[in-house]
Image (cartoon, grey):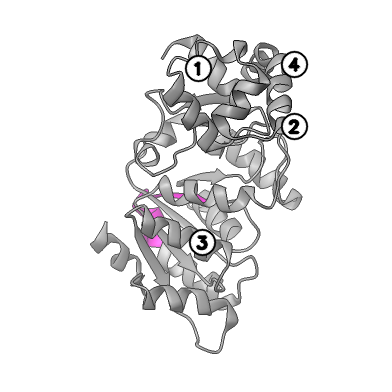
Amino acid sequence: MDLEIKTKLIHLTHCPYMTWKAIYTLFQYDPSLENLYQYSSKDFQNLFSFSQERANRLKKDLQTIPIQAILDNYEAEQIHCITIFDNCYPELLRNIYDPPWVLYAKGDQSLLKYKKVISVVGTRHPTSYGHDALKAVIDPLLKKDWLIVSGLAEGIDTIAHELAIGAKSRTIAVLGSGIYNIYPSKNKSLAKLIADQHLLLSEYPPTFKPQKWYFPMRNRIISGLTLGTVVVQAKERSGSFITADQALQQGREVFAIPGSIFDETSRGTNRLIQLGAKLILTAEDIREEL
């Protein structure tokens, strides 16, 4: 891909008022982004149906964000900017409805080409049953060199990453914030270990702070990177339930570990089974499908 187009695309993702859809619209209108810096605020208003205030802010961001200096800093920090046009962009993710335009990665990029990949999501407040059930299902996969993708959240996500690391397998953590702003903060040491030996990934530039609407967007990447998603103890209308729903929309497998009908943290997983997710009891149930 032309380096100038790549730099402009990365610049656009650093503009807080840009959206995935607006970038898509811009590429339809100007595929080479040749005139990006010549557009007026009025052009942005008309092209994206932005308010005047939002269009003015975008124009200002394109004039003032020092993108080349930022890219030089990323290079020094060994943070890689992977655009959707790059060969190293993960193929499974490229095929979802709304793939991220840019991925910011720190760690082992080769993991993006891994073949045996599965994601794990679940409640931030697992019971001992949730912990033990996840370990029972995931450990045999880890012994067969499966890579685990999760979201670095408290609870099931953290357990999944730690199981992979403990088994000397591989893991990718997908963030709902920039790489410089790890959330939750209690997982900073885990994030550093993953960045050093595995892979941290985000569609948000490193300086971006976590926002509550980033996490549902992040979830489509967790499911989109993988062949299937394992759901362990999820409430209905939870982030894990959203991830599973997105996996189904992406045509990926969803595996749910069942739980007690009296346990609130199992209502989401039990509902997913009703909606067509595969009920799993062992790792073999996953391997049969994948």
Q: Quadrant of the N terminus?
A: top left
Spatial separation of the CA atoms under disc 2 and disc 1 = 27 Å
Q: Where does residue 175 sit, x and y in percent of width and height?
A: 60, 44
Name the image quarter holding the C terminus: bottom left
Q: Are marks 4 and 1 in contact (CB under 8 Å)?
A: no
Three-letter amino acid code of the residue under disc 3 = Ile
Secondary structure at numbered mark 1: helix
For disc 2, the neighbor class at 10 Å (few under 14, some 14 to 19, many from 20) is few
Residue at 45%, 22% in the rendered image: 29
Q: Which mark is residue 53?
A: 2
The correct choice, above or below, for 204 with respect to 123 in the image is above
Q: Amino acid at mark 2?
A: Glu
Report the mark closest to the observer, 2 or 1: 2
Q: What range is drawn magenta here?
A: 139-150
Kindly identify which numbered label has been placed on residue 6: 1
Residue 134 appears anywhere in the view: yes
Give the residue type at disc 4: Thr
Indicate which label's residue lies in the foreground, 4 or 1: 4
Q: Amino acid at mark 1?
A: Lys
Residue on which disc 4 sits: 64
- The front one of 95 and 117 is 95
Q: Which callout, 4 or 1, points at the residue further toward the start of the chain?
A: 1
